[in-house]
Image (tube, rainbow, N blue to C red):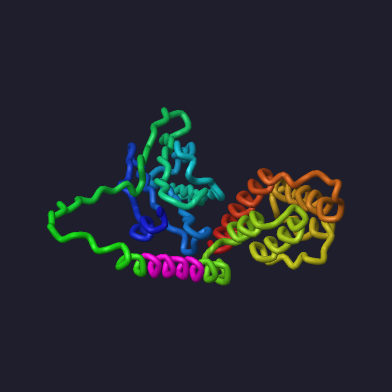
Amino acid sequence: MILGLLLLFADVELEPRSLQGMTGVLRIELAREPEGIGLAGVWLHLTVTGLPTAQLDGPRLEDPLDAWRERWRLSSWTAEGTIVRSVYLVQRKPGPAPLPDVVLRVRTAPDAPWHEWAWYEPLATSKPVAPVEKTSMPPPPAWVMWPWVVAAGLLAAFVAIWWWQRWQRKPSKHLSPEQRFLQRLSQADDKEVFVLLHKYLNESFSLSCDHLTVHELQHLLVDWPVDLRSELLLLLEQAERVRYSPAAAAINHTRLHRWIEESGRFRDFRQRRQSV
């Protein structure tokens, strides 16, 4: 399974790409906990350094087998010219699953031409196979082998159950507030979004707003950008309607995911500004 292969490469940095003073590095990180029995989770971290004027488009993932689905996509940057794009992938089903090709379009300035950096078949490896020596020894009888086959199957089942239970119990302390919210959101229905949004605000911005109305919360966000604050209030109002009215329209998850990413970038920017 792909999980067994990735355990050999828990954190791999692939060959860098360069262009006129810019350098791009693709790092592949195996998630610390599996996404299910036989299902792996993988982070693709793209880091581009060198020019503050650099612009990126992507990354684009080419997965002809449709073996992976994208759960999260995050982005961050610094004034020194470092841009990081991270994509979290989850296997769709157990079994062999090569990672998709990663293609990134880059340019040194807004008026410069685009160039493509590509990492094809990440983690693709080949190992020499030793020649098989012929032997005249006859194979053992089937009745001698079957106890070992049964024992191996039972051991594999025990390890899989133990791993699953350990993953279910262990909290995801290594995840950011945005990643924890998106993980909870993927396991919840729309009626729980209102409560989850309040928990996210508590964890990410230390806002004690569990018992505040939407209008009361607005007074706590006066230092937020107008677009970010207005979008949050609209999402909270929609989530509140869905929570109490079965006939309300469903949550727009694409819009919600976009707001979570923008709020995380705003929090990081505010923390960097306060530390200066």
User: Residue sitting at 77 percent across and 65 percent down?
Assistant: 209
User: Is residue 2 shown left or right of residue 248?
Assistant: left
In the rendered image, the vertical position of residue 270 relative to residue 124, given as above or below: below
179 lies above or below 100: below
Magenta: predominant secondary structure element? helix
Q: Is residue 217 above or below residue 74?
A: below
Magenta region: 149-163
**Does residue 88 show up?**
no
The answer to if 156 sits in the magenta stretch is yes
In the rendered image, residue 74, in percent from the top left (x then y), is placed at: 54, 50
In the depicted view, which residue is nearer to us: 72 or 142?
Answer: 142
Q: Quadrant of the N terminus?
A: bottom left
116 w.r.t. 45: above or below:
above
Residue drawn at (47%, 59%) of the image: 31
In this view of the protein, which residue sits in the foreground, 3 or 175?
3
Q: Residue at x 33, y 42 (%)?
A: 17
